[in-house]
Image (cartoon, grey):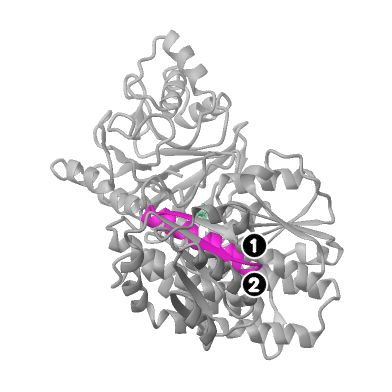
Amino acid sequence: MCGIVGYAGDKPAVPVLLRALKDLEYRGYDSAGIAVLDPGEAGALSVTKKQGKIANLEAAIAADASAATTGIGHTRWATHGKPSDQNAHPHLSCGGEVVVIHNGIVENYAELRSALVARGHQFRSETDTETIAHLMEERVKAGESLLDALRGSAGLLAGSQAIVAMSPDEAGVMVAARLGNAGGVVIGYGEGEMVLASDLAAVLPVTQRVAFLADGQFARIDKLGASFVNVAGEALQVPVKRIPIDPVSALKGDYQHFMLKEIMEQPEALSDTIWSLATLEPAELYLNDLGAAAERLAGVQRVVLIGMGTSLHAAMIGRHYFEQFAGVPAETDNGSEFRYRDPVLGPETLVVSVSQSGETVDVLEAMAIAGTKGALQVTICNTEGAQTARVAEGAVYTRAGLERGVASTKCFTAAVVALYALALKLGQAKGRLSADEVRRRLAELAKVPDAVARVLADAKRYQRLANDYATTQHLLFLGRALAYPAALEGALKMKEISYIHAEGYAAGEMKHGPIALIDPSFPTIAIATKHALRSKMISNVEQVQARGGKVLAIVTEGDDELARLADGVVTIPEVSELLEPIVASIPLQLLAYYVAVHRGCDVDQPRNLAKTVTVE
Ligand code: F6R
């Protein structure tokens, strides 16, 4: 959830940390802080931290730029302790022996804190994180190295954590740990310098050679490299990989917001995803990252798809693909619910986790449960080497490039494409799809990037349309069948970035309650495209209008009947039934974006949200 960064090298650390923190600000922006250590002067540790965005931290540092060449930094999404300067990371031990940044929750922090206070420790913040600094302090004072102090303290912490620490006693050194699924620690190998961060976005501008800490791994890092141990202190080999992501794609370019850039990038993101997974001549699927999972597909009897938020909506669309192509029962669940049930799964169940980051804690915990039951696991992920990909037997990567806007757009549509490809592969493995059928389905998929591009070419229209919705208090999004998850996603986009109360509903369910809300001040957006049970949707549109509600309908080009009936229409090009929700989602993304801009909202960093949710 929070962003963590670190640097050890010969350059001044402060600019490197600030730039990296900006790359991670989407993860949380309640406060930011850095600690730097000057190797020249023993004990020269300085900490600066400020409530609010990184700009506040930058302003605080400007007058006091340090030449220190080792440092750590943090951008916070508050869990324990309100957003404030005091609760901002990094956190110091009593005498500044240890300084810590942290992502995750120390679930037993209250108990640890009382014990530490009873032993004479003085706390300066309300955070759970500070307990780690005090626990490590005791060990460092007893003569342990910083790495051993982190290992020893880690055993006392309940919950999932990613922790990075420094000490003035070990100039030029950072230590890091990953315990559970509270987010990643990516260690980047530069030339005579090392960086670390909670995700790749902040490492790639320095180097594409990276190592990922896995659960239970600890690292000691200085400017010359890193060494790794497990909790018992035994040396580990952690592979260093070259990541083929172009850091340029992380830049905002001429766009006002990352979200708009990412919406506009969808034709390319979809095309890259499709052609990394398939060819048309010959019509073949190349899901090479499925690895050993490919061999087990023929035995799959059931599919369970797991995700959170937007990724869950992608999974809900994907469910239809598995049922149609593979003829197996498919269901979806929210990772945070799944993990607390006792789900019935077995080796014949394929669990498909959908997570653009591959680091969402509820998805990872759900995967852990699926693992204990012997289910076959495949993840749909946009981040190569992410934790879901390490846990699953196989992966299907989307090629959407880095997504920086907190509201997911291109990763959503790319995930739907990846699910389509995986479902085709399963249908093939189970002998349900002929070569001709696969060819036909791939040819239909190949048309999608172009259809999306045609909707985007008319983006300005949504800017004008946004005027009509910018002052509304409530919005209802309706859809049926495959358009139902698209309606849920339209409502989620609208509420998260514009703060307008929006509900997504299965249109057939509307009469069972929500229709009571309809009045002239409560507009409805209805996905009534050609294949989305259009005739039934026409009835729903009429029912809303009969109660004085106004309806904007998303329709297929040429649908004059709905154009006459609805109060407003936007059209999308015709694509095959199964792929319609991808194209129908584009107008909803654009509308949410322009409504949010019209309302003056912080589109890329909406309040209370974070891009990667690594806490419960
Ligand atoms: C909403 C949004 C979130 C994420 C959710 C899961 O726009 O982005 O709902 O979809 O937090 O994130 P991932 O896909 O990284 O697991």
Which residue is situated farthest in the left direction here? 63
Identify the magenta region.
Answer: 477-502
Q: Quadrant of residue 297?
A: bottom right
Q: Earlier in the sequence, mark 1 or mark 2?
A: 1
The image quadrant that residue 188 belongs to is bottom left
Q: Residues within 10 Å of mark 1 (few under 14, many from 20)?
A: some
Whether residue 550 is in magenta: the answer is no
Q: SS for tag 1?
A: helix
Decide: is 168 above or below 326: above
Q: Is disc 2 surrounded by few (<14), some (14 to 19) or many (20+) residues within 10 Å? A: some
What amino acid type should be assigned to the residue bearing mark 1?
Gly
Q: Amino acid at mark 2?
A: Lys
Residue pictured at 58% horizontal, 49% vertical: 238
Residue 399 visible at all: no
Q: Is residue 183 left or right of residue 350?
A: left
Residue ranking furthest to the bottom = 281
Residue under circle 1?
508
- Residue 147 placed where, x, y %? 49, 32
Residue 485 is inside the magenta segment: yes
Most frequent secondary structure within the magenta stretch: helix
Image coordinates for residue 550, horizontal then vertical, percent: 44, 67
- Name the residue that disc number 2 marks: 536
